[in-house]
Image (spheres, rainbow, N blue to C red):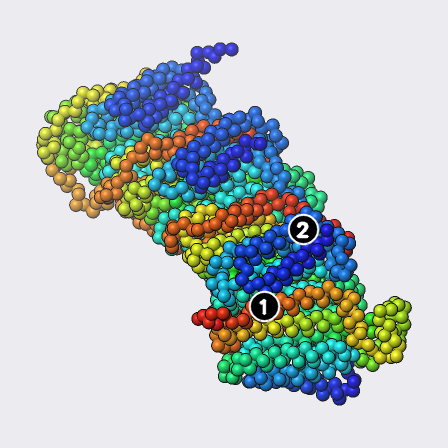
Amino acid sequence: MPPSSQEITSSSLPTLLLLLPLFSALVILLAHRVLKGACVAISIFSAAICFLISLMLLGTKDAAPLLLPFIEVRNFRVAIDAVIDHQSRGMMFIVTSIGFFVHLFSVGYMKEDESKERFFGSLSLFMFSMTGIVLSGNLFMMFIFWELVGLSSYLLIGHWFEKPSAAEASKKAFLTNRIGDFGFMIGILMLFMANHGDVSFSGLHASFTEGPLHDSAKLHPTFMMIAALGIFMGAVGKSAQFPLHVWLPDAMEGPTPVSALIHAATMVAAGVYMLVRCAFVIEASPDASMIIAWIGGLTALMAALIATQQNDIKRVLAYSTLSQLGYMVMAVGLVAMQAGGSHHDAAAPGHPAMFHLYTHAFFKALLFLGSGAVIYACHHEQDIWKMGGLAKRMPIVVITFAIGTAALMGVPWITSGFWSKEAILGVAFEVKGGSPLLWIGVATAMLTAFYMTRMFIVAFLGKPRSENASHAVHAPIIMILPLVFLALLTFFSPWDWAARMLEAMKPHHAAEHHTVEIASILALLVGSSAGYLIYKGKDTDPLASNPLAKVFANKFYFDELYTVLVKVFQDGLAWIITGIERIFVDGIVARLPAFVARRFGHSARALAGGHLQGYTFLLGAGLLVVIYLIVFVLPQAGH
Amino acid sequence: MSPLEIVILLPLIAALAIWLGAPARITSVGSALLNLLLVLGLAWNFKSASAGKAGFAYESARIVLDNPAISFGVGADGLAIILALLTALVAFAAVWQISADKPGIYHIASHLIAGGAFGAFLSTDVFFLYAFHELALIPTLIMIANHGHGDDEHRKSVAWKTTVYLGVGSLILLAGLVWLVLEFSSGGKLTFDLMALKAQAAATPLPEGKQATIAFILLLGFGTLVSLFPLHSWAAPAYAAAPTPVAMLHSGVLKKFGLYGLIRIVLPLLPQGFYCPCVQNALLFMLLGNILIMGFVTIHQKRLDDVLANSSVMHMGYIFLGLSAGTEIALRGAVLLMFAHGISIALLFGLAGRMRNQIGTLELNKLGGLGAHAPVFTVLFAFGAFASIGLPGLANFAGEVMIFLGSFTTFGSTSFGPLQWAVVGALWGVVMSAVYMLRAYRSIFHGTAMAGHFITDPGWSQRVPFVLLAAVLLIAGCCPWILLGLFKTDLATLTDAASTAIHSATKAVSH
Amino acid sequence: MPPLLFYLFVLITLGFGLNVVIARNPVTSALSLAVSFVGLAALFLSLDAYFIGVLQVLVYAGAVMVLFLFIIMLMDIKSEEAGGRSSMAAIVAGVVVAGILAVQIATVSGKLPFSGKTTQEAALKLDEAGARWEAKGKENLPTISRDLKAGELPDAKLMGETLFSKYVFHLQVVGLLLLVSTVGVVALSKREKEASSQS
Amino acid sequence: MITLNHYLIVSGILFSLGLAGVIARRNILIIYMCLEMMLSAGNLALVAFSRFRITDGLPDYTAQSLVFFTITVAAAEVAVGLAIIVALFRTKQSVDVEAVTKLQG
Amino acid sequence: MSVFTIEAFLAILGLVLLMIEAFAPDISRRTLASLSIGGTALALILFFTVASHDTASLPAFVQPWMKLDSLAMFYKGLALVITLLVLWLMHECAPYLSKYTLDGRLSEMFSLPLIVCAGMMWMAAATDLVTVFVTLELVTVSFYVLVAFARKSTLALEAGVKYLILGALSTGILVFGIAWIYGATGSLSFEGISAALIKPETSKIPALLGAAFLLAGLGFKVAAAPFQSWVPDVYQGAPIPVTTFLSVGSKAAGFVVLTRTVESLMVEHSIIGPEVKALLLVLGALTVLLGSLPAIFQQSVKRLLGYSSISHAGYLILALACGDSVRTGMTSGGIVAFYLATYLPMTVLGFLVLAVLRVNGQGEDIRDFRGLGKRSPLLALALSLALASLAGLPLTAGFMGKLFVFISLVDQAYWGALVCATIGAATGFYYYFRTIVAIYSNEGSSSEPLKVNIASKFGAVVLAVTIIVLGVFPKPLQQTLSKPLEVAAKTH
């Protein structure tokens, strides 16, 4: 029978969604010599189409089409299959829309770059892999694309690979993610084993809710905890949670659009997305959810603290991204704690983490692109202390930037950031044992307000502090447009109708707890006013001398610590083990026997020493031995 | 005459022809291409052809000796076909990339090695299976000793080490095989025919203790040839010193013989022995040695060829892991990984060789910034490098992941056995391989180039072999089911034997 | 043979044999070897192997020893040219090896079932042997049976009979061997025609 | 009384004497003499055995004929051997075993 | 036609040639060579065509002493072949050999091998120790002459002296052994000995003593440790053709006697069987080690081949020790014969190349082989084949023999001996490949092509092909040799 239109869309749209960017990536890889500038067009075109498709998808109803049998062994199969539900549809929209805008923005931003073909190719590759993650219907598929986004981020961070810092940053990013994936894989394998080889989300969900794994939380708590934490470790790597957060700030070595798309809005959020996807796994282990929540909270606070003392505009934003991601992860943990082992459908619409992801995606992308515009205007000057007074020179940029900042600080009632943050703090408030996390959240909010104010004031107000700043030029229209669009999205996203339409699962209990509201509003006021008072009209950072501030400025010395760890536990160990391997293993297995053989052979040569007497003696002695053996030994030996 | 015999003889004939003075390059590349097409054809036609007994196709046998019954028997099941495919591909690439200024012996040696590999993979008679592998060793050693890299004395010593090492290994192997034949030959008369041996093994399996002993001897013998830790120390120096085509062929193809032998001979004939706890635990220790210890050793290397050589030693551990898991998924994964690793390491060695020719050194700290000068070269190298660190979409990933999955098929259980712990170690190995590969990649292609240390992109004709290999990596990585489809059935029987053995073993443990 | 004589001849054989080994001068050695062989021949006689005994005297004590002496004279090797003293080690080695070997043989030599017998105990039964010979009816050698009947051992005849009836082929081969050795000797010891630098 | 044992022991001692000479002496001529001694020791043993292994009333003449062949062969060997030794003496002016130590290792 | 006729013909031909040399001194070497070679070839043809395999066909006066079982026929054939090859090699080497002989004359070199051949053929069929002793001495004495013949070369002379002294010593030991065996068993024929050894009343210890001396004496001829020390020196010193003759001919002769002796000593239910077996195992293992390990250091290929022949002797002794292998249906004698048959072409090929190098004024050291791959690709390839085969690489003749030995060892679970055999083989890989690598190495001492006459080329090709064929398709040879099993079955 002919497939109904619904089926067609449900299987062909996702396929298209996947294949278009892949296609453009491949074309660019193979033919960029021929196509030259056309590459850009191809890439943008594919991004645009994807945007449209994801819009079309918004209407469709849930489905789980199989796209490709990847590995098939008799009854076992690892498939590339899409799951289309509210979550993936919403995420698809975020990815493709921001992706599209970033493509546009890049056309302007990368104009002078001589290898922009490579850039756009990698962008398409990223779009492909990200789409894969969003659509993936089982953990393996997710892992596959998980690694692929890692690759594309590696390529994009290292876009200017002649710069050693960029090269190092890309390497660092990939390796840190690899460590996360190590745990991720273990988690997957454990689930694979526990769930009889079925790691599709639907299958897992089924067996966790009423299937064999239903009360695994009680039966084997440790196993479930390790499994959950394994899965979480993947997220830790990808979403740059403590302690694997170190790569994200360095990733700012990449071109700014990349930072906006990958390292702010989408890829880093993939971790959260994945956690929400398999929330039921985490719920199965209260301990795990507790740990996750706390790691999220710590990351949020720590990143916020660090952000207060960064001078590179992009780094400030990077750390704010970290801390917002911390929020989301904390939210995941909190919701799981709230579930407390009992399985309510956590993936149902209205997960605060997803909501914050959604709002954050837009305003953070906006902020990054804005900063990109600023940097572009200031001839790739990134130090905020060398800017200033830009408000007059680029009004639109500044306005959009201000909207973004407001959203990030969570200005009450009008900004998206406010609602999503409230949602998270609300959960923290509800969950018993969540109060410390609540206060961490509030503190983070205060700090956020503080450092954003600081950045805004220092960068845009006052008078220019450098040549570049004073001759800042206004960005071209192609870069302005995305800013505007994103500003609009930022503005409208929290409204119910928008949220419903985009299926951004606006939480049901946003803005209920007045204590929380008051707390966060107070935090906002305190933070921003502090920032205003301290930095108003300053040309240098007054806090720089403060020892505590130094600690923040140096990111709690994490990089130094890790450098030492790598030196000792990797290179040192490698040195030692190599020595052992060369000396002992090779020595015992190979050199010793060889040596013995040579010695023996050498002394055996003496038997043919050339002296007749020696030979005759040997003959005689041999005769003796033979007689002795055969006459006096062997008969007794009892053969 | 079976087409497989042509496949085996063609390279040998080509070598002979070149020796007799035929134009080296044309003959060699031509015959290699011909063989590649032939093998592809056979693979294509395999499904329909595989009507032979026990899933073997294109069978033929010529009696060579009556008692012990030895016959030059060839035949191909999916496993053999895949490895033949690997051989054909790598051989083609290897002979193509030999630069014109090299003497004919390069081509002769390459073809001899290829012929030996074909013979080893395609014979259905234990005797010839063993014999062809040995045949392939001589040219390897001669080439290392006479045309290898490094100063004369170093080359020679490496060559001797390899010679004696592999010699001892193959002799241990021979002893094991002879014992096997003696045990499994039914009714007084000895036979080396694999089918007959299998039949006898199925009819009257040996007591487990004896099985375990023989299996362990064979494991040591084959293991030496595959550089199983701690019998590995010949491999890295040999590959580092070997001339490019030899390195490609030996590390890519010939080395797989040991694993092939284990799958082909040990698993079906001695399942209880191979999967008895003692042998298994020993094997797990050794392969973890391969993965973790060699991983660290590789991280420590300072020259690209050393990195590649050691990494290829390290990656053997994963394939052994697949064997030790023994489930069908894992075994297929192992075979897939054999193929993938062969292609990727051949690609990497080939490119490294080209780099050595142009720059003259492979010292990592003397290189840099090549990415800007030779983008095509860089991309090709990236294919190899990322494949070998198991990036999805390239062939190695599918194999590795299948091995991992196959090791976790103790369904429903929520506790780790030794195998699962080994997998955890292996997963950390994946991280380590990423570390050394990216370090190498970064210091060669990123940053800024040293003065005078430039390379040029390969011209169109020079690209052919590398592009071919890269393409294979991509295809096999994106659609592994194509390869996996080649052997639907033939591993099934084997794995049933294995799984029953495993279960009995686990029972033995649990009781 | 009475023990006394036996021991006398043993003394001669071994004593002069020892002298061969220890004498400094080759001539002395050669002569003592001859004497020792004579003693040995006497032992052969004591074993009723008259023909062998005679052969021993003729071939060894006669021909071979003469040959030796001739060569020694020809080269006129003085004891010092004969090579310096052997090293102590060599001597010790020789003594030890020989001693152990002798002991070993001695221990074994008693182990035979009939090694305790004397010649008297293991007496020859000449008459029945003679009867057997008659029964064989060997016309060509009637004397053998006659002698046997007469109670004396026709050693040479029996020996000859054995050699020329049973061992003809071997005799031929030995003849061949002798010829080969002759030719070899000629080829090896002939002087070169034109006195060239070598030899 | 004199038993076979005595003869065997004598032959054994004679053999050992010869061996001792062969090992200990350096003069090739004397070594050669000692070899002859060893041969005749073998002969003595053979004769003794043949005497005590009485076959139909007579000594075993097969063994004695072997002795005969041994003696003959020994003579031939002596001839060839001395020829070689002479050749050696011509080239090296010495019959010391230490004159032939070029081939070694 | 009786085989004996052929042997007699050879012996007489040898005599005639000797006489010619004696009475017509100015006859050209070429005629001599062609005469002897032609004669041997004729004998060979006759042997393989019309010779009868029936013991009854022998003349009456040799019948009691000879038995024409297939083993005997095989070794006779082997003797003929090797003699022919040696004579041809002699002819090849004549240019450089004549420099070292008296007045540059080689006549004995062409006549003595014929007599040696006759002796070996007789020995192959001998059934009693008297015949063995006489023929063995015929061969040995002729070899004394042959080894020392190129007496103007001091090395050859030295080799001659060493071979002479040690050979005579071994003869003495052999005689003593025969005496004691006779004393213990009362018989000199192999049947008689084994018959006596089956009887329980036979006194064991004296028999063992006899066996010890006998094995020591024969062990010297086959270069078994610890009686092997003469081999390297003599092989290195003797003229190349003579060395070839020694390493194949005399060794084969020694082994046929050893085989028959061991078979009669180790006949089943023999009272001394186990001891002899154990002793042979020990000696075999020791021989393998003492043959291969010192070879690591050799620089002279000729000497190297000497050592290699020792280690091969070790494998053969192990084969003998294992006794008849029921599984493969081959007697130990059959295995030994097979091994020797495969050993012949590779050794001769090796020496042939040495000879060619010598004729081209080169030495015998490994460094003289450098660049041979360029100077004469054909010889290079052939020699590499020969060496690979000596190393026991599969698909060459050398492997099958080793395989049979391995099968026997594993079958009887003699792990110690197996380990020694393995070590030996592994070392072999080293020193043979060292030479192969030298052949194909770049830094050739000189690179002008070698002068190789057509005969040598042809010979090399034939031998190489033989190696391959025996390695890949050993069926016919093995079938001719697995006949002895029935014979053995009949005898026991």
At horizontal 78% and vertical 87% (from top left) the residue drawn is C2
Q: Is residue E436 above or below residue A412?
A: below
Can residue B323 be seen here? The reply is no
x and y percentages locating residue A232 in the rendered image: 40, 36
x and y percentages locating residue B427 in the rendered image: 44, 41
Q: Foreground: A594 or A25?
A: A594
Disc 1 secondary structure class:
helix
x and y percentages locating residue A196 in the rendered image: 53, 32
Label 2: how many residues lie within 10 Å, few (<14), some (14-19) or many (20+)?
many
Identity, as a three-letter code, of the amino acid under mark 2: Phe
On the image, numbered disc 1 is attached to which residue?
C184
**Host chain of mark 2:** E
Q: Are marks 1 and 2 on the same chain?
A: no
Is residue A352 toward the left or the right of residue E235 in the image?
left
At horizontal 35% and vertical 23% (from top left) the residue drawn is A23
Contact between marks 1 and 2 (CB within 8 A): the answer is no
Q: Is residue E477 above or below residue B476?
A: below
Q: Foreground: C144 or A381?
A: C144
Disc 1/disc 2 C-alpha distance (Å) = 29 Å
Q: Foreground: E250 or B156?
A: E250
Mark nearer the viewer, 1 or 2: 1
Picture quadrant where residue D33 is located: bottom right
In the drawing, what numbered circle is on residue E47? 2
Picture quadrant where residue B68 is located: top right
x and y percentages locating residue B58 in the rendered image: 57, 31
Q: Foreground: B322 or B351?
A: B351
Disc 2 secondary structure class:
helix
At horizontal 22% and vertical 27% (from top left) the residue drawn is A110
Picture quadrant where residue C63 is located: bottom right
At horizontal 29% and vertical 26% (from top left) the residue drawn is A32
Identity, as a three-letter code, of the amino acid under mark 1: Gly
